[in-house]
Image: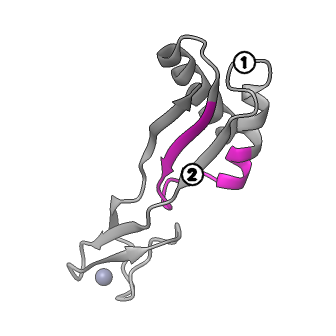
Amino acid sequence: MHELSIAESVVETVLDRTGGRHVTVVRLRVGKLSGVVTDSLQFCFELATAGTPLEGAELWIEEPAGRVHCRSCDREYARDDMILLCECGSADVEVVSGRELQLTSVEVV
Ligand SMILES: [Zn+2]
């Protein structure tokens, strides 16, 4: 389960940085092309935080849209799904942005 391992590593990183203080909010940036299911990540975050200083913390997820570049027709455009097929019919499409998975900030008490 991909989202559970992400949630666990987020919790580990936050615990590392906050030194066991009570955390109330965790903010993540999860690109729309990262393949991460945010509903599932929310659920896994609750599981991963149980019994830790992060228990009960809110997870705020920002989802920036993706941008892709087609090598065949040399166009760049926004894309919100993982179907990387250009309108020109080419599948030779690279992701320019939208795969980010970053912990942006936390709030501690
Ligand atoms: Zn194209």
Quick check: 64 left or right of 58?
A: left
Picture disc at residue 61: 2
Q: Which quadrant of the figure has residue 39?
A: bottom right
- Residue 41's place in the image compared with 92, above or below, is above
- Residue topped by disc 1: 52
Q: Residue at x 23, y 83 (%)?
A: 73
Quick check: 39 left or right of 80?
A: right
Task: Look at label 2 and name its amino acid.
Answer: Ile
Along the line of sight, the residue nearer the viewer: 25 or 36:
25
Q: Residue 92's x, y, as percent?
A: 33, 70
Q: Residue at x 59, y 25 (%)?
A: 109
Q: Residue furthest left?
A: 74
Q: Residue at x 69, y 19 (%)?
A: 53
Residue 82 on the magenta segment: no
The structure's colour scheme is: one colour
Number of labels in the image equals 2
Q: In the image, which residues are magenta?
A: 24-42
- Residue 108's place in the image compared with 104, above or below, is above
Q: CA distance from mark 2 to mark 1?
A: 20 Å
Picture disc at residue 103: none
Q: Look at the image and tell me in which quarter the N terminus lies.
A: top right
Along the line of sight, the residue nearer the viewer: 73 or 81:
81
Along the line of sight, the residue nearer the viewer: 85 or 102:
102
Residue 38 on the magenta segment: yes
Quick check: 10 left or right of 3?
A: left
Within the displayed image, which quadrant is ligand 1 positioned in?
bottom left
Classify mark 1: residues with Cα within 10 Å, few (<14), some (14-19) or many (20+): some
Quick check: 74 left or right of 84?
A: left
Task: Look at label 1 and name its amino acid.
Answer: Thr
Classify mark 2: residues with Cα within 10 Å, few (<14), some (14-19) or many (20+): some
State which tag comes first along the sequence, 2 or 1: 1
